[in-house]
Image (cartoon, rainbow, N blue to C red):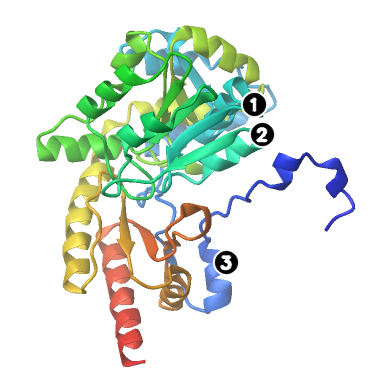
Amino acid sequence: MSRFDHLILDHVRAMPTYVPGRSPRQAEAESGVPCIKMASNENPFGPSPLAVEAMQAAAANVNWYPEIDNSDLRAAIAVRHGIDPTNVLVTCGSSQMLHIVARTILAPGLNAITADRSFIVYPIVCMAVGADLIRVPMRDNAFNLGAILDAVTHETRAILIANPNNPTGSMLSPADITRFLDEVPDQVVVVLDEAYAEFAEAFAQQRGVSYSRSFDYVREGRNVVVLRTFSKAQGLAAARIGYAVAPAGLIQYFMRVKTVFSVSSIAEAGALAALGDFAHVEKTTQNNLRGAEYLTRSLAELGLTALPTWTNFLYVDLGEPASPFAKRLEGEGVIVRPMTGNWNAPTAIRVTIGTPEQNAVFLGAMKKVLTSAAVR
């Protein structure tokens, strides 16, 4: 207990704390061995070289406040997706946009709906404004859209859908999403969180299917907010920059809630350059396609099943408590993410698909941990 507890709102006291993936420095200090991080779905090839060059140049002007409206990047994003710049809001990562949505349309007495195993920031943003979050059980490790519709009440104002989903890696088809949106009541905003879009698009092309019609929904004026990020395929996770695409009528209110100057000029310069670096994204996504197939097959040979993925990570249910298993992996030099706590999957781990060398190190560590468990 703290002497400040009586000053804090009840819903803030009840909020969970976001627990990030462990850094190599933390893990190495405890394990005493060099570690590679395969826990937070980061780009194993680093940032776009073009982005690094642009950010270095922009650093010379950090004495000036950045542009509030990020007009150059908004214009470039609009051209890329065939929409109007008034449909775009640039934010400090897509997580900030989730907070903006919550602060704009949620409040005590209202609720949002998501799946019971999805992005752990969803409950945090809802509880931060005193709103309830209804978590609907998944079906076949994916969002159960019918059950979500059944859970809608007069107090529902938002539905949060990660597509592909983090952590299960599952994807909903455009046909499923379209049918779902046709049934959603007018008072509800549907957030389509597409943080892993580039990876899903690559898998969809490989598998001969379509990934998303999300920008069509915005052009049609539906109550949809699409989230994208530069943290994953472009490798700009530490720069903290992403964007939302939504009807202009919603964007104008989101802009009022967004913290001024929250997107740095350095981050915007990097994102602008990364947006045009098709070669870096292609290198990243093609490596991911090969890595997903290799890891899935190799894990099966070890007796473990990885769920089919549309992302840059694999979800593996170990059938045993994940946290001690992950700790043993750290002892072998590999950091993965146990899906404990608010992830709501205490026997599962999530592992980022890395370079071929990193994937080989991970599999070697898995063999050692599984073998040592067998002899015990």
Instruction: Using the image as rendered, state which of residue 162 and residue 132 is in the foreground.
Output: 132
Label 1, residues with CA under 10 Å away: few <14, some 14-19, many ≥20: some
Residue 275 visible to an observer of this rendering: yes
Is 21 situated above or below 98? below
**Residue drawn at (36%, 52%) of the image:** 44
Instruction: Using the image as rendered, state which of residue 97 and residue 198 is in the foreground.
Output: 97
Tell me whether circle 1 and circle 3 mark residues in contact (CB < 8 Å). Answer: no
Q: Which quadrant is the C terminus positioned in?
A: bottom left
Tell me whether circle 1 and circle 2 mark residues in contact (CB < 8 Å). Answer: yes
The residue that disc 1 covers is: 107
Q: Residue 36: horizontal and vertical position, in percent?
A: 42, 65
**Residue drawn at (37%, 29%) of the image:** 149
- The image quadrant of residue 364 is bottom left
Amino acid on which disc 1 is placed: Ala
* Left or right of 6 in this view: 284: left
Q: Residue 318: horizontal and vertical position, in percent?
A: 33, 69
Amino acid on which disc 2 is placed: Gly
Instruction: State which tag comes first along the sequence, 3 or 2.
Output: 3
Q: Indicate which disc residue 184 carries.
A: none
Q: Name the secondary structure under disc 1.
A: loop
**Residue drawn at (47%, 53%) of the image:** 343
Residue 229 visible to an observer of this rendering: no
The residue that disc 2 covers is: 130
Residue placed furthest toward the right: 3
Instruction: Please state which of the two labelled residues, at mark 1 or mark 3, is closer to the viewer.
Output: 1
The span from disc 1 to disc 2 (Cα, nearest Å) is 6 Å
Instruction: Please state which of the two labelled residues, at mark 3 or mark 2, is closer to the viewer.
Output: 2
The residue that disc 3 covers is: 26
